[in-house]
Amino acid sequence: MKATPAEWEILQVLWKRGPQTVREVHEALGAGGYTTTLKLMQIMLGKGLVVRDDSTRAHVFGPAMAREQMQGSFLEDVLRRVFGGSAAALLQGALNGAKPSADELAAMRRLLDEYEERQ
Amino acid sequence: MKATPAEWEILQVLWKRGPQTVREVHEALGAGGYTTTLKLMQIMLGKGLVVRDDSTRAHVFGPAMAREQMQGSFLEDVLRRVFGGSAAALLQGALNGAKPSADELAAMRRLLDEYEERQ
DNA sequence: TAATGTCAACGAAGTGTTTCGTAGATCTGC
DNA sequence: GCAGATCTACGAAACACTTCGTTGACATTA
C-alpha cells in the first residue's frame, strides 16, 4: 500500500520513536490540528500502514511494516517515474538536495562497497 | 514548482528526446488518451514546468528547467519526508531498488568523488 | 468547395488528500 | 455524582490530480 506525503511524516515518527498515541504523534509533528492527525492515522489503519492496540483508552499505533521495506518500494516508483531508472541520477540529485557531511559521505561509500561485494 | 507523478513521466520524455509535440509525447508514453496528455501539458505550462513554442500549428513543448535542478529539489522533499534527512538511507534504498551494474556503480563513485572535491 | 483528419482549448466528472468541526464516550478531580 | 478534560469517530469541505468528451479552428485532399 502507498503512503501519501502527510502519512510518511507520521510513519517517520513511529519508526523513530516506536509505538505512540495519536497525541504523541501529533506533538512530535508540531503542526496542524489534533483531529487532522487522528483522521490520518485512522485512514492509515484502514490502509494497513499502521497497526493499533486499542486495549487502552488512548489507542497506541505502531508501523505495520519495516522502514527499509516501505522506503524500498517507494524508491522503485520514484526511480522509474522521476529518474528514468538511473540510480546514478538519483544519487546526483541526493547530493545536490541533501548536501551530506563528510561522515555521511563515508557511510555512502561503505554502502557501495558492501553492495559490490554482494554482487 | 512541484510536479505530480504523471507530470514527471512527461518531463522524462522531454529531457530524453528534446522538445516535442503533444502527439509525440503521447506516443512516447504509450498510455492514456491524447487529450489527457494534452491537458497535463497545458497544466504544466501554467505551472511553468514546460515552455511552449506555438508558432506552428502543432505546438512544441520543452522542459523549462534542467533535469538536475528539478530532481534535486524533488529529493529535498523526499529526503526529509520519507528518509528523515538521511542521504545514506536513500542510497541504500536505491541500491536495493535499482540493482545497478558495475558501470553504474563506478559512475556513482565518481559522483561521490566530484562532490567531495567541490566541498 | 466539401469531406476528412488533426489540433488546442475547455469543462466536467471521479477519485484521492488534507483539514477541521462536531458529537458522543470515557476518564479524573472535586 | 458532576464539571471539565481527553479521547475516538464521523462527516463534510476544500483542494489537487487524472481522465476524457466535446467543441471549434485549421489543414489536407479529393
Image: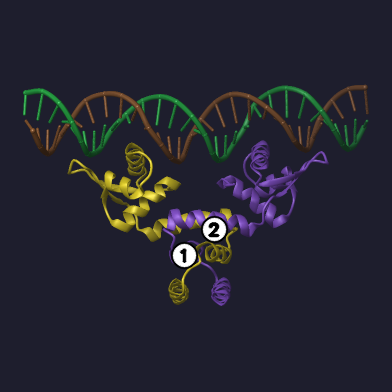
Chain colours: A purple, B yellow, C green, D brown
Q: Number of numbered discs present?
A: 2
Subunit bearing disc 1: A
Q: Nearer the viewer, mark 2 or mark 1?
A: 1
Residue A64 coordinates in the image, percent (x, y) = 69, 50
Mark 2–mark 1 CB contact (< 8 Å): no
In the figure, is residue B41 to the left or right of A11?
A: left
Percent position of residue B71, x then y: 43, 57
Residue at 42 percent of width and 46 percent of height? B6
**Distance from the alpha carbon under mark 2 to that under mark 1:** 15 Å
* Secondary structure category for the residue under label 2: helix
- Disc 1: CA contacts within 10 A as few (<14), some (14-19) or many (>=20): many
B60 is higher (above) or lower (below) than B17: above
Q: Is residue C8 left or right of residue A4?
A: left
**How far across and how far down the image is residue A116, in percent?**
54, 75
User: Residue A47's spot in the image, x, y percent?
Assistant: 63, 42
The foreground one among B103 and B20 is B103
Three-letter code for the amino acid on which mark 2 is drawn: Leu
Residue identifier under label 2: B79
The chain carrying label 2 is B
Q: Is residue D21 left or right of residue A74?
A: left
Is the residue marked by circle 2 packed among few (<14), some (14-19), or many (20+) residues within 10 Å? some
Which of B17/C22 is in front? B17
| Both labels 2 and 1 in a single chain | no
**What residue sits right under mark 1 in the picture?**
A87
